[in-house]
Amino acid sequence: MTWYNLIFFHVFKRYYKSGRYRNDIPWLTASAIVGMPSLLYLFTITALAYYFAKGEMPEVDKKYALPLGFAFLALNWLWFIGGNKYLEIFHNFNERYLRDKFTETLSWVYVFGAYFVFILMILSLKIY
């Protein structure tokens, strides 16, 4: 899970500013920014695996999909928030990766790539 914490670190450092923040909750924002793409990747991988196994896209039932999505985001939030883990992650990675632009770029590619891959899957498989 080090890579996941590293992605969180790069998103979190854009919001934290050493405790000087206004009108925002950095750990909540960063957790949501990392959690939503992870949920999209999970959905995309699951849907593609089902598609290649069965030859059709799975039916999505909102009464199950929405609670499971919220549960995943809640678990993601608890992963970073529980016991002030966000500060532990920030201080562990701060000296090694603060100025590392390559890993920061890869972290943002992970975040924005989820939306691109998800949209590409929807358009190519004609799910809509």
Image: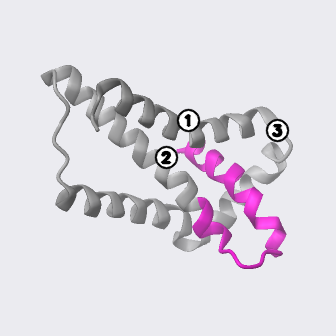
Image marks 1 and 2: residues in contact by CB distance under 8 Å: yes
Mark 3 crowdedness (10 Å alpha carbons): few <14, some 14-19, many ≥20: few
- Residue 31, magenta (yes or no): no
* Residue 34 drawn at (x, y percent): 55, 52
Looking at the image, the residue that sits furthest to the bottom is 23
Q: Element under label 3?
A: loop
Q: Element under label 1?
A: helix
**Residue at point 60%, 50% (across, down):** 5
Give the distance between the C-alpha atoms of the residues marked 1 and 2, in whole angstroms: 8 Å
Judge from the rendering whether residue 111 lies leftward or rightward of residue 100; answer left or right.
left
Q: Earlier in the sequence, mark 2 or mark 3?
A: 2
* Residue 13 drawn at (x, y percent): 75, 57
What amino acid does circle 1 point to?
Gly
Nearest to viewer (mark 2 / mark 3): 2
**Residue at point 47%, 67% (across, down):** 78
Give the distance between the C-alpha atoms of the residues marked 2 and 3, in whole angstroms: 22 Å
Residue under circle 3? 100
**Residue at point 17%, 52% (across, down):** 61
Q: Could you tell me which quadrant the C terminus lies in?
A: top left
User: Which label number is shown at residue 37?
Assistant: 2
Residue range of the region highlighted in magenta in the rendering: 1-30
Q: Earlier in the sequence, mark 1 or mark 2?
A: 2
What amino acid does circle 3 point to?
Asp
Q: Quadrant of residue 68?
A: bottom left
Residue under circle 1? 113
Q: Quadrant of residue 31?
A: bottom right
Mark 2 crowdedness (10 Å alpha carbons): few <14, some 14-19, many ≥20: many
* Residue 47 drawn at (x, y percent): 27, 34
